[in-house]
Amino acid sequence: MKNIRSLFLFLIVLTAFFAFLMADSRDSLADLYRGGKVRFTPELTLDDNSMPEDVFFQSPYSITGDNEGNIYVCDFRANNIKKFNSSGNFTKIIGREGQGPGEFSWPFYVTFARDRLIVWDMQNMRLCALSPDGEYIKAVNVSFNVGRPQSMRSLPNGDIVIEKERIFFGEPNKPQECTVEILSPDLEHKKTIYSHEVWRNKFVQFEGGGGNVPQPFSPLVYWDVTPEGKIIIGFSEKYEIEIYDADKGKLSTFSHSYDPVKVTEEDKKAHFGGMTYSRDGVRTKKIPDYVEKNTKFPKFKPAFWNLVVDSEGNILVFPYRENREEMSGYFDAFDSEGNFIANVQVVGDVPFPARSGGSFLGRYIWATRTGEDELIKVIKYKISD
């Protein structure tokens, strides 16, 4: 009887174990994508009410997290980083406006690299390394002559992947140079793993000055990093994605079929309609002649407008669609090797900004939003079917 009872108990434990494995498999992000629809459900919201009365969000842009679940929100207009614990409780402000050690002037990007915060301090033109509590470790000046940082991610070994874009001022017929580079945790350049020309802007000179003219629907470089440390890079001229290793270089390439989307007259009107210019101190929507003359619209839009990697290493690519309102509501999902999973529709809110993408931290994604009450919010979303 004792043996039968032990065997019965063992079978119960074994059944529960396999049920756990099956549930875990069903709940994987890849399996959610195979269902063809996902929903991003807000689970936690940080706003001015989450902080002391004299602390508020001004322009949060970049979000990262550390190994203990703390969240760091880089607020560039406030010139600081706001730190919250894993429960969303405010813990401290890191940094303040200034030029000294630990001070910022428009900090745009932040990433957590093993045991330190790495910050792109734009107007001070430097990369900064800080402790998780904000203690100054090191800063390295970055000359715009070698490229301005566009985004950053960290690798499991503590190295930093950084995208830079170099503008050749005074050379209007020369495109920008986009590079993806590897830095050590001490902010020393180790290698450049990728380089491509882009036409994000065209620099033009005119009487009384010069300026950059944005080039609409120009193919750009999009990239992200998998949890295992692979670097996923796509140049959107074609639907082709490359997989890199920081040490070995390019490992593989995969492509996907797509239907090119034409640039319409409505697209052209929308491009110019979103621009404003200052003339004699007055803001106006009248497009200067030099802008209209130097704006070139392609016949077709690029293959995609964004690329992000989720917490399981799946690659999410956002292709252009004929209906512009649907663009952010659909993505193509691939596994970490580039095998196609499904075209997925997003139901409800879509936490993927066009350039930086949402920040996947574990099974959640963090993004910024402005609510109907005009409060700026930092929202933690759970992915579900």
Image (tube, helix red, strand yellow):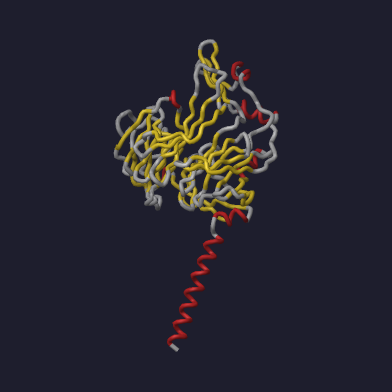
Q: Which percent across, then down, holds residue 109?
A: 43, 36
**The one of 48 and 69 positioned closer to us in this rendering:** 69
Q: Kindly tell me whether residue 56 is visible in this rendering.
A: yes
Count up the numbered dots: 0
194 sits to left or right of 266: left
Image quadrant for the N terminus?
bottom left
Looking at the image, the residue that sits furthest to the top is 207
Q: Kindly tell me whether residue 385 is visible in this rendering.
A: no
Q: Which percent across, then down, holds residue 195?
A: 51, 32
Q: In this view, does 88 lie above or below 149?
A: below
Q: Which percent across, then down, holds residue 100?
A: 30, 30
Q: Which residue is drawn at 56% across and 43% down?
A: 252
Q: Is residue 296 above or below residue 26?
A: above
380 sits to left or right of 98: right
Image quadrant for the C terminus?
bottom right
Q: Is residue 311 above or below residue 100?
A: below
Looking at the image, the residue that sits furthest to the front is 248
Q: Which residue is drawn at 51% across and 27% down?
A: 177
Q: Quadrant of residue 219?
A: top right
**The one of 267 and 126 positioned closer to us in this rendering:** 126
Q: Which percent across, then down, holds residue 13?
A: 47, 74
